[in-house]
Image: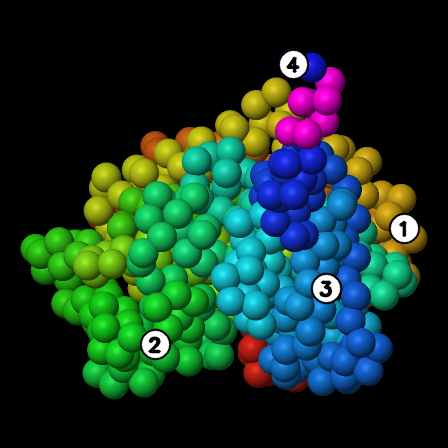
Amino acid sequence: MPFRHAVRLTLLVLVLLPAGSSGLFAQTAADLFDPSTLHEVRLFMNSRDLAQLRERYRDNTHYTVDLRWRDTRIRNAAVRSRGTGSANPVKPGLRIDFDRYTTGQRFLGLRTLVIDNLWQDPALIREHLAMALFNRLGHPAPLQSFCRLFINNEYQGVYALTEEPNAEFAARAVGDSGGYVFEYHWLMPFYGGDLGNDLASYKPLFEPRTRELEADSTLYRPIRELFREVNAPEDAVWRERVEQYIDLPQFITQAAIETFIAEDDGLLGYVGMNNFYLYRPAGSTRHVLFPWDKDNAFHAVDKPVLDRVDENVLLRRALGYPDLRELYLQKLEESARRAAEEDWLALEIERHTSLIAAAAHDDPRKQFSNEEFDRQIDFLREFAARRSAFVLREVAALSQGSIPTEPGLRGGRVQDRIVPWPNRRSPLPLDRNRVKSPSSDD
């Protein structure tokens, strides 16, 4: 092609590119969530709005913001503070809504973006490790990457760019964007009990993130029926009835993965269920779960694999079925082996640490000291070195019908149900000077 024709073609392409495009070679959401890159994201907003966002960080007030990443700038987006236990005025968590003020506007195909402040994790990498393992095991989970965040050109610290579970996420995760996405909000200790016939009892707990304008009967009746059937008398058709409303193998898989990573505030959390999304396809009553907010994962190397299974009504009853009990043990074993395979978890810890260590030490707004950051990274290294072997020993004992033992606990035999291993720690007080569970995030 003659040079002048190439120039004309290039100019024509540049003219046709939409405003805000990153250039001839467009970036994608996969580039944004590339976990091997420490991104730089810059937000620009009115200084008075920023001061108000910090002052009123418990509110959901939206403010106008521009976002710049690489050579892409998105204008007239909306930003608000996010989080409950992680909400704070020093290093606020943020949620960007790209089409609130500009109808149809997207950023790399995303309608929203969560910019997670990593406030509750002294190591800053727990959630990245957890979500990476979920995805490694083929269980749908949000994508994440790290960034250095600047607001009005002032460094705010290390944040996580996080894919929000919504219609776009559902399309990627389960191949269906037309269904119902619900975010669970911790308001009280909830272990899967029946909250009664009134749909209003479920509305505060399950916030719709898609199809929000539909009738309450359409949104919440399948959720009410789920927990009604879970708590119904255990008879010959209990499982058949429950499986109309939830994918039991998928639920058990998520519970097993969370148990392997010693999640302290998830489906088997210390104050009940927490940090998950429900998804239900349109025209169906059957739900699946997505994990969320894993800052409290990797809690203890020796967390028992049956810790708290007796507290959750659904899991306790489901594990009474031999095939589901076997599935739980299989998923625990698979998690342990895949984490240890070729030192995957240990190498992930080193990769993430080397990527963010300097930026983390320079983070002027993080809650914990640099010394605590280093100590927590060392703990995660110990977790990677020891957790898989611990879990595999427990799974082997349970597969043989034995209850795993430790000093101070007696051994035994499994009868017709899995017998839960007693909690070793005293329960934490429920009143933690707050309304919600400490790591619940919206």
The secondary structure type at the circle numbered 3 is strand
Q: Which residues are magenta?
A: 3-9
Q: Is residue 376 above or below residue 387?
A: below
**Numbered tag placed on residue 267 in the rendering:** none
The three-letter code of the residue at mark 1 reads His
Alpha carbon of mark 4 to alpha carbon of mark 1: how far?
A: 52 Å
Element marked by disc 1: helix
Outermost residue on the left side: it is 236
Residue 87 point in image, percent of width and height: 69, 73
Dot 3 crowding, Cα within 10 Å, few <14, some 14–19, many 20+: many
User: Is tag 3's residue or tag 1's residue first in the polypeptide sequence?
Assistant: 3
> Who is closer to the viewer here, 238 or 247?
247
As drawn, 341 above or below 224? above
Amino acid under disc 3: Asp
Residue topped by disc 2 = 213
State left or right for residue 289 relative to residue 111. Answer: left
Q: Residue at x 29, y 45 (%)?
A: 249
- The reply to whether the C-beta atoms of the residues labelled 4 and 1 are less than 8 Å apart is no
Q: Report which residue position mark 3 lands on.
A: 66
> Cα distance, mark 4 to mark 2?
55 Å
Of labels 3 and 2, the one closer to you = 3
Q: Nearer the viewer, mark 3 or mark 4?
A: 4
Amino acid type of the residue that numbered disc 2 sits on in the rendered structure: Leu
Question: Which is more N-terminal, label 2 or label 4?
Answer: 4
Q: Tell me the crowding category of disc 4: few under 14, some 14 to 19, or many 20 or more residues within 10 angstroms, Cα based.
A: few
